[in-house]
């Protein structure tokens, strides 16, 4: 894919997405959701973060469209809107693992 396929607006949007995902706790939350909808209590347990911290990051992820809330009775469950997001994150992790295996020290 060529950089020429990106205009200034889409590069800015992509940069904003990477900035949002640069926060390690947000990545922990996304990965903890997996492919299932989970209540906030499960996210807290899976990540070891406080309820306040999880809620803060879930709000940012929700506003960016990276998670979607689902009300189930008195509880709110959070889901990935598209399972492809989890695959993309896994692809980045695999790419980094391969890169660090091939190049040491990392560039």
Image (cartoon, grey):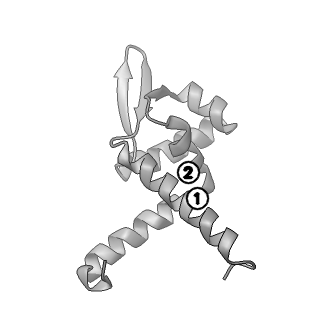
The image quarter containing residue 97 is bottom right
**Residue 62 vertical position relative to residue 34 in the rendered view, above or below:** below
Q: Give the residue furthest to the right.
A: 105
- In percent of the image, x 40 and y 35: which residue is there? 79
Mark 1 touches mark 2? (CB < 8 Å): yes
In the image: residue 28, left or right of residue 67: right
- In percent of the image, x 58 and y 58: which residue is there? 23
Question: Which residue is more in the foreground, 92 or 102?
Answer: 102
Give the percent coordinates (x, y) of residue 76: 43, 25
- Residue identifier under label 1: 23
Give the percent coordinates (x, y) of residue 38: 48, 27
**Residue 13 vertical position relative to residue 24 in the rendered view, above or below:** below
Q: Give the residue furthest to the top.
A: 73
Question: Which residue is more in the foreground, 84 or 75?
Answer: 84
The image quarter containing residue 45 is top right
In the image: residue 62, left or right of residue 56: left
Question: Which residue is more in the foreground, 2 or 56?
Answer: 2
**Residue 48 vertical position relative to residue 88 in the rendered view, above or below:** above
Which quarter shows the N terminus?
A: bottom left
Give the percent coordinates (x, y) of residue 41: 58, 25
- In percent of the image, x 37 and y 33: which residue is there? 69
Q: Which mark is residue 27?
A: 2
- Mark 1 neighbour class, 10 Å CA radius: few under 14, some 14 to 19, many 20 or more: few
């Amino acid at each position: 894919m060529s950089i020429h396929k990106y205009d200034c607006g889409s590069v800015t949007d992509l940069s904003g997405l990477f900035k949002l995902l640069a926060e390690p706790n947000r990545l922990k939350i996304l990965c903890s959701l997996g492919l299932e909808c989970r209540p906030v209590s499960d996210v807290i347990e899976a990540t070891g973060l406080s309820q306040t911290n999880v809620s803060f990051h879930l709000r940012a992820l929700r506003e960016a469209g990276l998670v979607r809330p689902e009300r189930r009775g008195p509880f709110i469950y959070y889901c990935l809107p598209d399972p492809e997001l989890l695959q993309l994150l896994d692809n980045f992790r695999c790419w980094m693992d391969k890169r660090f295996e091939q190049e040491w020290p990392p560039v």
